[in-house]
Image (cartoon, rainbow, N blue to C red):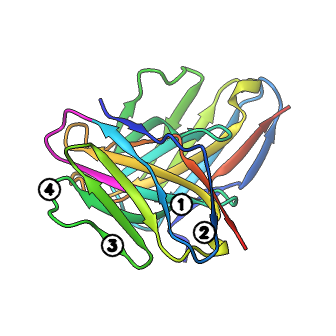
């Protein structure tokens, strides 16, 4: 079974600063995918970025990058140049090769961007 | 251009009165999911479909049922809602197999039980 841990219930960041949201995971799957989602107060989960367990390079998507450290089983999300609209809940999720149709989520981090 | 649509966005139901939440998709994805999300918690997978193949999570209460009459539609039935079932219910879809394919979510239905 997969387990996702997000140890930061809440984070504050100043507008235009960078912020790192932590995610660690545990799995026995030989291959897996890691995802980050943003959930604004409206409720919809918005896909941000994906990292495959065999990818050699860290994923980047615009202002989002994923700091993937496989040996440490961590997949931290880095948001550069924070904007007020980044204030939301952020969830780390995993999809494994075994039971591959299931997504497992961490408990989330609430990010508040201060003007 | 919404691809996963949940209706209604807000649902108020009485304690013990059956309620149905609906989800439709235009993505033609084989896999559809129902998640329950309580305030400030991780979304919890209730069940998912691979085409018509239903997969129930071991800890999903019997009070929760689901139907998928065709590829596009999926329903969540709560037979006798209790106060503890008040939550956001999220529907999602995905292409099957492959660890790299993301899930696409609807906007959710916020259920209140009175």
- The segment highlighted magenta reads A27-35
- Is label 3 in contact with label 1 (beta carbons under 8 Å)? no
Q: Secondary structure at mark 2?
A: helix
Image quarter where the N terminus of chain A lies is top left
Above/below status of A7 relative to B62: below
Q: Secondary structure at mark 4?
A: loop
Q: Nearer the viewer, residue B7 or A51?
A: A51
Q: Secondary structure at mark 1?
A: strand
Give residue A60's mark.
3
Q: Residues within 10 Å of mark 3 (few under 14, many from 20)?
A: some
- Residue B112 percent location from the top left of the image: 78, 39
Give residue A38's mark.
1
Q: Label 2: which residue?
A: A86
Q: Nearer the viewer, residue A46 or B25?
A: A46
Task: Give the left or right position of residue B72, taking residue A73 as reference.
Answer: right
- Spatial CA distance of label 4 from label 1 is 24 Å
């Amino acid at each position: 079974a997969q387990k996702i841990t997000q140890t930061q219930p809440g984070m504050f960041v100043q507008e235009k600063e960078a912020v790192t949201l932590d995610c660690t995971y545990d799995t026995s799957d030989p291959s897996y995918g890691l995802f980050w989602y943003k959930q604004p107060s409206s409720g919809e989960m918005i896909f941000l970025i994906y990292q495959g367990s065999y990818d050699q390079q860290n994923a980047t998507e615009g202002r989002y990058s994923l700091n993937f450290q496989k040996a440490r089983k961590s997949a931290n999300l880095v948001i550069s140049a924070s904007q007020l609209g980044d204030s939301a809940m952020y969830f780390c999720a995993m999809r494994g090769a075994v039971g591959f149709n299931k997504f497992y989520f961490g408990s989330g981090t609430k990010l508040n961007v201060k003007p | 251009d919404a691809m996963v649509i949940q209706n209604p966005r807000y649902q108020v139901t009485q304690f013990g009165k059956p309620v149905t939440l609906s989800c439709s998709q235009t993505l033609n994805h084989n896999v559809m999911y129902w998640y329950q999300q309580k305030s400030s918690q991780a979304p919890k997978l209730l069940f998912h479909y691979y085409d018509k193949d239903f997969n129930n999570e071991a800890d999903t209460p019997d009070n929760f049922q689901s139907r998928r009459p065709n590829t596009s539609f999926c329903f969540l039935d709560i037979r006798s809602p209790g106060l503890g079932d008040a939550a956001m219910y999220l529907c999602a879809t995905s292409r099957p197999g492959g660890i790299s394919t993301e899930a696409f979510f609807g906007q959710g239905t916020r259920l209140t039980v009175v």
